[in-house]
Amino acid sequence: MSEREVLLTGIGGQGVQLAARVLAEAAIVDGKEVQFFASYGGMMRGGNTDATVVVADEPIDAPPVVAKAWAVLGIHPAHLADPLARLRGDGILLLNTSVVEVDGVESPDGVTRLELACSTVAHDVGNPMAGALVAVGALAASTGLVELASLEAGVDRALPSYRRQHVESSVAAIRAGAELVA
C-alpha cells in the first residue's frame, strides 16, 4: 500500500474528530505508519470540523497538509468543497446521505462513490453523534485500509475516561457501517 490520505469533514457534534482519531489508532494497532491532523472552529457544536489521517506501510512522506487525498468522507455538506477539490481521480468519496444532497455533489471521473445514511444508522444504533464512525467502518470494510477489529480497539484507545459509556455504541456504529457495504 502506498500512502492513503483520508479527509473527513463535517460539523461539530458529528464525531468527525473522534472518528479520525479512531482510524489513526486502528492503523497503529495494525502496525502502520500514521499522521493525524485536526482542524475545527471554536464552536462546540455546529461549526466546521475537518481531520486528515495519512496511513502507510513505510515512513510517511506527506506534508502536514495534503494536496491530494485518496478518500473524502463527507459527513456534512457545509464544508465539503475544499476536500472534494483535493480528491484524487482514483479515490473514494463517501457521502452521508442523511444530510448531504448527493445529486448536487460532483466528483472526478474514476472516483468510487459510497452513498450511505451514516447519521441515520448512528441514530439507529443508539449513538446519534457517531455518523462519522459509521462512515469509517464502511471505509474500512470496503477498502481494507485497516482491520475492523483494529477500529474497535481504536475506539477503546481514543475515547477519554469521561466518555467510556460510549464505547459499546461507538463500536456498534463502526460495525453497522461495515455491514452497510458488506
Image (tube, helix red, strand yellow):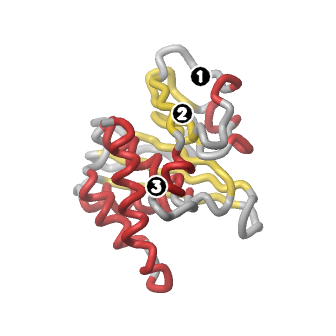
Q: Out of 127 and 2, give the one closest to the viewer.
A: 127
Q: How far separated are the C-alphas under marks 1 and 2?
A: 14 Å
Q: Earlier in the sequence, mark 1 or mark 2?
A: 2
Name the image quarter holding residue 27.
Answer: bottom left
Per the image, label 2 sits on a secondary structure element best described as: loop
Residue occupying the point 53% across, 38% down: 72
Residue occupying the point 57% across, 41% down: 96
Residue occupying the point 28% across, 40% down: 144
Counting from the top left corner in percent of width and height, residue 88 is at 51, 26
Q: Which residue is mark 1?
A: 107
Per the image, label 3 sits on a secondary structure element best described as: helix
Classify 119 as above or below 97. below
Q: How many marks?
A: 3
Label drawn at residue 148: none
Residue occupying the point 42% across, 80% down: 164
User: Mark 1, mark 2: which one is toward the viewer?
Assistant: 1
Classify 46 as above or below 163. above
Label drawn at residue 68: 2
Per the image, label 1 sits on a secondary structure element best described as: loop
Q: Label 2: how many residues lie within 10 Å, few (<14), some (14-19) or many (20+)?
A: some
Q: Which residue is mark 3?
A: 133
Counting from the top left corner in percent of width and height, residue 79 is at 71, 44
Q: Quadrant of the C terminus?
A: top left
Counting from the top left corner in percent of width and height, residue 73 is at 53, 42
Q: Are marks 3 and 1 in contact (CB under 8 Å)?
A: no
Q: How far separated are the C-alphas under marks 3 and 1?
A: 23 Å
Classify 137 as above or below 104. below
Counting from the top left corner in percent of width and height, residue 18 is at 50, 63
Of the residues shown, which amino acid type is indicated by label 3? Leu
